[in-house]
Image (cartoon, rainbow, N blue to C red):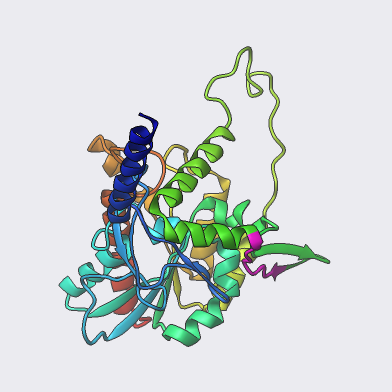
Amino acid sequence: MTLRRSFGVGLALLCFELLLRLVAHGQPTLDPQKGWIYKATTVRHWLGEGHGVSHWSPQGIRESPFRPDRPSTVVLVLGDSITEGLQVSDQAVYPAQLELALQRSAWPAAVLNAGRSTLSSADYIATAQLYRDEFRPTWTIVQLRLDDLTTDCRQPSRTHFTDRNGHLTIEVVQPRMGRVSRWLAVVRRASALVDVAIARAGAFRAASRLPPMFRGGASEAAQGVRPPEVDYPIEEELAMLASAWSGRLTIALVPDSSQDAGPIERRAIDYCRRNGVSIVDLRDVFLQFERAQSSPFGFPNSQYGFGHLNAEGHRALAGLLASELKGLRARGLL
């Protein structure tokens, strides 16, 4: 009986392994200069948020079914997991939708999606010359969330901003793999079942660190206690970002739909408008989603209105960017 049970368990695990290899397997590669990137592989997301199928070039650029054979313009898109867009398929992510929109207006532009999870504004400055030399973009789009200008770009374990003697500088931290990490990477590439198990354990661990939705007694806000505010030098950060790309960039701002525009968002927009930096704000279409009783964030298998952009959100951001790039082209800037 024990032998039968062992055989049954083994057969079940084998079936799960084969199934997961079809629907949820794909590991990034550690590039010594770019960090963790997907190379020439197919990736289906972990089924916990969306279910996108993605394909990648050897250079770590996400493939697009709308790529023109002879592009007249090369637009490079940088961003974090919003731009990487593993939750949606190749044709739905906003750089591909932008590529399609430009082609429909008789503009055969190649829009190269180099988005990677966990990046921030400090990374886009540190790697600017690397990407400019490799892809020679005519124009660059940098997707930012508000955290990319505040807390995320100050994580000491990643490339981050530091304030030295009153001057903002960037400290580059190259991703490294220890002995255990190397062993886990080998195991995860060999087994889709182990890969998904580790990914899901990480998701649960991250969720466990979130604050509780409800607290007993009066809240800190009700008691008049507020966390200290940090005056982040976002104008200086944006100036460094624009300089790194010689001013030839458009910032795609993706704020949290659950909050009203705060001081960080307003300061970023005001700085760009005062200094002639091209910027679009996804908040400009939030009202349209509200009227349609919809949201640009969330999926049927995740929390509504939160998380990464869904297909409609990607399409909306692509529409804003298409209008912005066409305007820049009409002014002779692109």
Question: Viewed as shown, does residue 293 lie left or right of 79?
Answer: left
- Main secondary-structure element of the magenta-colored stretch: loop
Residue 66 at x, y percent in the picture: 21, 72
Of 167 and 24, which appears nearest the observer? 24
Q: In which quarter of the image is the C terminus?
A: bottom left
Question: Viewed as shown, does residue 137 lie left or right of 102?
Answer: right
**Where, by quadrant of the figure, is residue 57 drawn?**
bottom left
Q: In which quarter of the image is the N terminus?
A: top left
Residue furthest out toward the top: 217
Question: Viewed as shown, does residue 198 lie left or right of 122?
Answer: left
Of 142 and 115, which appears nearest the observer? 115
Residue span colored magenta: 169-179
Residue 102 at x, y percent in the picture: 23, 72
Note whether 114 is above or below 223 in the view shown: below
Residue furthest out toward the right: 165
**Where, by quadrant of the figure, is residue 280 drawn?**
bottom left
Does residue 98 appear in the picture of this structure?
Answer: yes
Identified at 47% across, 39% down, the residue is 260
